[in-house]
Image (cartoon, grey):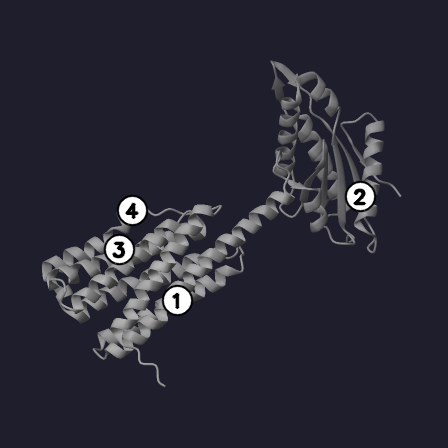
Amino acid sequence: MDLQLDLPTVLVLYKTALIAGALSIFHISRHACQPRGMRAMAAAYVLLAAGAELAGQGEHSALPAWFWTHASLLLGTVGYPLFWAGTRGLSSRRRVAWGWLLLVPLGWLALGLATQFPLNNLLRAGAFHITATVAVAASAWEVWRDRHVEPLPSRPLLAALMLTSASLFAVRLVYIATETVSSTGFAGAFYVQMFCHFGIALMVSELSSERAEARLERMAQTDPLTGVGNRRWLLAKLPAQLPAGSAVLQMDLDRFKQINDRFGHAAGDRALEAFAECARRQLRGTDLLARMGGEEFAVYLPGVDPAGAESIAQRLCQAAAALRLQADGQDVPVTVSIGLACVTSPGTAWSTWMARADQALYEAKRAGRDRVAVYRP
């Protein structure tokens, strides 16, 4: 039996999909770790459903023509710019000024009241489709362009659904412009749009779940005090065997227990935070810095020769000594001892080089602290 797609039935399904999508996105926003933009998207779905309902009632002569034509166009041209603004917030956390957002629907409304073009079905549909095509295509771009900043698996799928929806609007716009549109074609297009809109709601849910998982993973691999990676993070990043032309640093803040005993644990925490921030500024973008526990830190330096590694270590040592911290009006002395092991031959496990850097660290402490010691085979 052939499936017959009549426009009134499809519009009912289309409105149902929009309402279901709005409820789904709103529910997700209540529990999401980054809910910005989601409620705007949910509101956009509700406005589009309301516009479709007005259009359906108007087609059955249940409402005055002047009212439903202008009102349905207004709701549609508010809904899609709002959808774009919500997607922008969801994707990249960049806000849109509401004044700029309202320019589109208010512009169409002013033109409609002046010319009464919404009373013409093709002209009204053309205005709606222009707005929808541009807004949904822009939404797809917002999702796609932040794929490197936040590389989550749901991003390409969400962008693809939005692009498919925008393409459908664009194709229908061509039919409207050439006056070759038919009710059967519109019904089929709305039928596909229904799946696109519902799929977008599902992908928003998936994006929120992936963000929550990524956030938990970051929390599990980040030291909460200093914000640098922890031991687990560093060991996950290190190759099984360190390549030649790299180096490992083991670092301890000197006399850290005395800082805690004399100035209090709050001062000790500030010393750890200040040193971590200081070390971050001295290191290159490719270097890995981690707090291994207590006052112990480690650094992996890829792509560096022995002279370059020692220069970085000396710079870290001097920068730590230059820190100026105070507690109760007294200076808190912060210095660091560093053990450096330069990887000169491949094929040796990272744990061996860490142990060698640790051995050099003890040499630095025995030699009086506040210095760099290099492991010598």
Q: How far apart in space, not on screen, are marks 1 and 4 (Cα)?
A: 26 Å
Q: From the viewer's perspective, is the residue at label 1 or at label 2 nearer?
A: 1
Q: Quadrant of residue 14?
A: bottom left
Q: CA distance from mark 2 to mark 4?
A: 55 Å
Reading the image, the residue beneath label 1 is 196
Q: Position of residue 351 (x, y in %)?
A: 81, 47
Q: CA distance from mark 3 to mark 1?
A: 19 Å
Residue reaching furthest to the front: 1
Q: Residue at x 76, y 27 (%)?
A: 370
Where residue 235 sits in the image (x, y, percent)?
72, 48
349 with respect to 237 (left or right) = right
Residue type for callout 3: Val
Q: Choose top left, top right, bottom left or bottom right for residue 300.
A: top right
Specify the amino acid type for callout 4.
Trp
> How crowded is the residue under tag 2: few (<14 C-alpha within 10 Å), some, or many (20+)?
many
Considering only vertical position in the picture, is 364 above or below 304?
above
Which mark is in front, 3 or 1?
Answer: 1
Query: At label 2, which amino acid type do we have?
Result: Met
Q: Under tag 2, what secondary structure?
A: helix
| Residue linked to disc 3 | 78
* Residues at circles 1 and 4 in contact by the CB criterion of under 8 Å: no
Task: Classify 10 Å Cα crowding around label 4: few (below 14), some (14-19), many (20 and above).
Answer: few
Q: In the image, which disc is placed on residue 354?
A: 2
The tag earlier along the polypeptide, 2 or 3, is 3
Residue identified by numbered label 4: 98
Q: Residues within 10 Å of mark 1 (few under 14, many from 20)?
A: many
Distance from label 1 to label 2 (Cα)? 53 Å
Q: Nearer the viewer, mark 4 or mark 3?
A: 3
Q: Residue furthest top?
A: 329
